Amino acid sequence: MKIVVARPPIFEAADAAFDFNISHTVFTYGDTLYNPGGIDPIFDYILAHEAVHAVQQDHSEEKAKEWWDRYLCEPEFRADQESRAYGVQYREMVKENRNREHRHKILFDLSGTLSGKLYGHCIKQDKAMKLIKLYSGV
């Protein structure tokens, strides 16, 4: 996946739909990770999360447009796609961590993000926790 410091093709639509901070947000569109805020470094667990979205979009611009059209308009689709990506992110974040309390806090924080304002409250937190855990395989 190539990484560019630029706004993705769907930036205006995403900006209108969601409440995000450009200095903390990256976007995958096809096989490109857009980093409009110039985040440095982009942690491995974020790259793993975004790689899931690249696969979901079949690494293609054509599929990316279809994917983003659904993502922006269908909360259930958004929750499904993000819970899978957060599952991989969670697995990456805890793979070296055996502390159960710390792992639970990470899971709680990720599910809080997924169920929160950033993603338009597309899922309840308890369901987000279950799905992230399921998709993590941990």
Image (tube, rainbow, N blue to C red):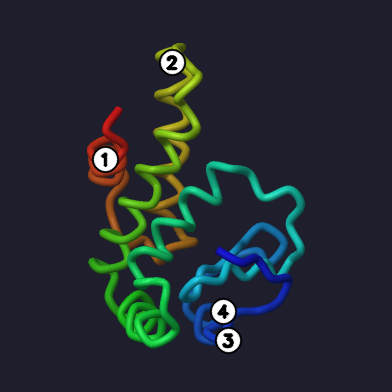
Could you tell whether 118 is left or right of 80 in the image? Answer: right
| N-term mark: 1 or 2 | 2
User: Would residue 67 be found to the left or right of residue 110 on screen?
Assistant: left
Residue type (three-letter) at the residue carrying disc 3: Glu
* Residue labelled with disc 2: 101
Front one among 98 and 61: 61
Q: Are marks 3 and 4 in contact (CB under 8 Å)?
A: yes
Quarter holding the C terminus is top left
| Relative to 41, residue 129 above or below | above
Q: Label 3, on which residue?
A: 12
Frontmost residue, 9 versus 18: 9
Residue type indicated by callout 1 = Asp
Label 3: few (<14), some (14–19) or many (≥20) C-alpha neighbours in 10 Å: few
Q: Which residue is mark 1?
A: 126
In the rendered image, which quarter is residue 95 located in? top left
User: Which of pointers 1 and 2 indicates the residue nearer the eye?
Assistant: 2
The amino acid type of the residue labelled 2 equals: Glu
> What residue sits 55% from the left and 49% below the top?
46
Residue pictured at 58% horizontal, 67% vertical: 33
Identify the element where label 1 is drawn: helix
Mark 4, residue position? 15
In which quadrant will I find the N terminus?
bottom right
Say which element carries label 2.
Answer: helix
- Labels 3 and 1: the sequence-earlier one: 3
